[in-house]
Image (spheres, coloured by chain):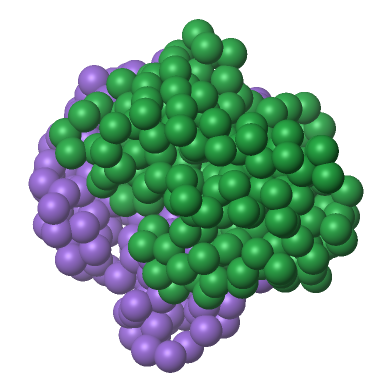
Chain colours: A green, B purple
Amino acid sequence: MDYRLYAVTDRSYLDGMDLVTAVELAIKGGATIIQLREKYISGREFYELAMEIRQVTKRYNIPLIINDRVDIALAVNADGVHVGQEDIPANVVRRIIGPGKILGVSAKTVDEAQKAEKDGADYLGVGAVFPTPTKPESEAIGVGEVKRIKEAVKIPVVAIGGITRENAYEIIREAGVDGISSVSAVFAGDIEKNTSLLIEEIVRAINDRRRR
Amino acid sequence: MDYRLYAVTDRSYLDGMDLVTAVELAIKGGATIIQLREKYISGREFYELAMEIRQVTKRYNIPLIINDRVDIALAVNADGVHVGQEDIPANVVRRIIGPGKILGVSAKTVDEAQKAEKDGADYLGVGAVFPTPTKPESEAIGVGEVKRIKEAVKIPVVAIGGITRENAYEIIREAGVDGISSVSAVFAGDIEKNTSLLIEEIVRAINDRRRR
């Protein structure tokens, strides 16, 4: 799994563009994973949208992760599911999805991270690193805490929350994470350009980190 | 399966009583199936509530059906799941849950009913029979249409929507359904008394129907 640029969808940024097109642009630009995140649609709409998105991600051989709804992930045979601390507990999700699907878990403390790892998570989404408009209620933990969490677990860590083209380099290099995750830095504005500039920063940071 | 009195939960009717107590009273009064229906809580809360309710239903050996969220039904190993026309399609749900769990589907037309039966539904929730405060947007189809649907399928049919102690007899007797389903007629007011009076009407109607 390539966790470097983990794009999380949000249709509210798309200004009328359909999500399938937006996801394809993100992939063309360099997104390495797509997470489909939907909050206010019916199960049927979520299912139908996920079926469409799955066609694009399959075509480009990019993993599709479904946010929160384990049943939607199973229904469309997605590559995995991502749950937060307010969703069905990770160990229960692992039991439902079996060993073959990717399980991601959100964590904002070392305790949550280690518990998630023990509960069967394949990777962690850690943050919010910085304050973020996507989740205004999520407290920013800073780069230092992300680093501490990364060092406390063996599974890959993706940093999330308030990440921009400007700070992506610092996070990757300083926190030692496996990738960054973003909604707005990917989907607001020119999606293909956003992702290609982001992946450039990420690659540069990983290379510089290795050289140290 | 005994579909005679299918109680659908709604905590907004409980006036401070906890749902576990309310469900136990409904079962003591005569409810034959419990459906846990929750709309505005997190996956974690839904999971935890379902785990609690499952203990009560198990103790009384009453089937527990989860509304809409197939993942919650799998997570708590409920007896089944109920989906509407706006949820994940019935044939997909059947594939996810396997042959061992009960699958209920809402239908308000003969077409929807026959499709659900073909898609693997074990029973149908048909209505709204009468206008109902629980789903004000749901058009009332009347007893005659419920009867027509019941006659068009082989699987059990539970009538739902606007059912009261006063009209339960008529619906059971005239529409030929296997049971009635209600939120408010069960959970508003004295729950044990509500259910015991309802089941009395249902039994009387079924007996009178048989005698015809």
Q: Quadrant of the N terminus of chain A?
A: top right
Q: Work out whether residue B32 can be spotted.
A: no
Residue under the point 44% across and 73% down: A137
Residue B105, image x and y in percent?
A: 40, 36
A18 relative to A84 in the view: left or right: left
- Of residues A212 and B137, the one nearer the viewer is A212
- Of residues A104 and B166, the one nearer the viewer is A104
Residue A171, image x and y in percent?
A: 63, 54
Q: Work out whether residue A170 can be spotted.
A: yes
Residue under the point 32% across and 51% down: A40
A110 relative to B198 in the view: left or right: right
Q: Residue furthest bottom?
A: B16
A48 relative to A17 in the view: left or right: right
Residue A124, image x and y in percent?
A: 71, 50
Residue under the point 35% across and 39% down: A187
- Of residues B4 and A121, the one nearer the viewer is A121
- Of residues B137 and A13, the one nearer the viewer is A13
Q: Quadrant of the C terminus of chain A?
A: top right
